[in-house]
Image (cartoon, grey):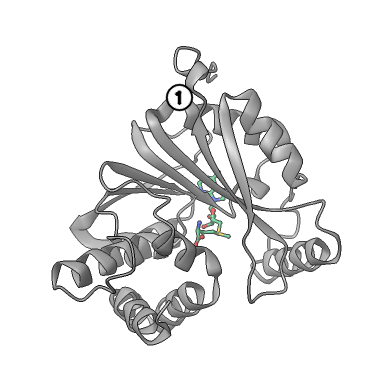
């Protein structure tokens, strides 16, 4: 990936966060630059070209900001010829936190719908892509399964579910991830926030029980963490057999 182009793209994506203060701006730049999942999603053509993208637990919406900036660059004819065309999606984020959802709304403007809500019960419209990055760990195991079942019900037949979680079977890298997350919770005074992890094989099995075939890819390059990205699509035989949601 031409690094200079990606840095410029990140700077453009982060710029609208200046309206919400220096922290939101620097956070957006740091997250988009340092977390390999964003480069992966731009370079891999994992996301569909058109349709609705639901970003569940979107935080301040940095993925959607990156996609907006990418579409603008591409429309201006400034796009590396060897990269897939950026997906031009109808963006919809759901976020529990008031401050984060406000920041997302302010940065993304009219180009994205941001709902403040809980992914355990917020209405999920039909979507061509559902992305859940580093969120399900905050739910218990039953809730995780129910949210994923709701996602499967909301996913269009050819849709894709993109999930990232830490791999509890990941040895030392998992312990680093777990402790970093625990410290982050403490820094937010969330002393009792439960954190529920599963080994990667268990995530794949759970998605399989819900009728999805999932491909697992390590997604921590350049960081000390032990995260895995699951890209899951409906099995053909599961089209007529959506799991029950509630
Ligand atoms: C680690 S952040 C990840 C944010 C975003 N997905 C990203 O990758 O930048 C986790 C986010 O999930 C949100 N969250 C946690 N539980 C949630 C729930 N039940 N419903 C909606 N959002 C939730 C948190 O408020 C937080 O913004």
111 left or right, relative to 40 = left
Please tell me whether residue 35 is drawn above or below residue 155 in the rendered image: below
**Residue 155 rendering spot, x and y as whole percentages:** 41, 31
Q: Along the line of sight, which residue is nearer the eye, 222 or 141?
A: 222
Q: Quarter-wise, where is residue 53 in the image?
A: top left
Quadrant location of the N terminus in the rendered image: bottom left
**Residue 100 rendering spot, x and y as whole percentages:** 44, 61
Quadrant location of the C terminus in the rendered image: top right
74 left or right, relative to 134 = left
Distance from mark 1 CB to nearest ligand 1 atom below 8 Å: no
Please tell me whether residue 132 is drawn above or below residue 105 in the rendered image: above
Q: Name the secondary structure under disc 1.
A: helix
Give the residue drawn at x 41%, y 65%: 62
**Residue 60 rendering spot, x and y as whole percentages:** 42, 63
Please state the total of marks drawn on the protein image.
1
According to the picture, the residue beneath numbered tag 1 turns out to be 153
85 left or right, relative to 153 = left
Q: Quarter-wise, where is residue 34 in the image?
A: bottom right
């Amino acid at each position: 990936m031409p690094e200079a182009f990606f840095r410029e793209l990140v700077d453009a994506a982060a710029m609208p966060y200046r309206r919400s203060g220096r922290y939101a701006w620097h956070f957006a730049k740091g997250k988009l630059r340092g977390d390999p999942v964003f480069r992966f999603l731009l370079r891999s053509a994992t996301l569909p070209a058109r349709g609705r993208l639901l970003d569940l637990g979107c935080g301040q919406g940095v993925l959607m900001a990156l996609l907006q900036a990418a579409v603008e660059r591409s429309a201006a004819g400034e796009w590396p010829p060897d990269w897939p065309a950026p997906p031009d999606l109808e963006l919809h984020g759901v976020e529990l936190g008031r401050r984060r959802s406000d920041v997302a709304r302010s940065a993304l403007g009219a180009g994205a719908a941001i709902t403040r809500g809980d992914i355990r019960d917020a209405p999920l419209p039909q979507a061509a892509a559902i992305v859940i990055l580093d969120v399900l760990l905050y739910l218990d195991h039953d809730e995780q399964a129910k949210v994923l079942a709701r996602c499967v019900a909301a996913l269009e037949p050819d849709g894709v579910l993109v999930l990232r979680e830490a791999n509890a079977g990941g040895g030392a890298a998992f312990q680093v991830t777990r402790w970093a997350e625990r410290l982050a919770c403490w820094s937010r005074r969330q002393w009792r926030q439960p954190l529920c992890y599963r080994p990667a094989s268990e995530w794949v099995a759970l998605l399989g029980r819900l009728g999805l075939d999932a491909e697992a890819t390590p997604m921590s390059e350049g960081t000390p963490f032990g995260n895995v990205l699951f890209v899951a699509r409906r099995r053909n035989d599961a089209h007529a057999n959506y799991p029950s949601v509630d």
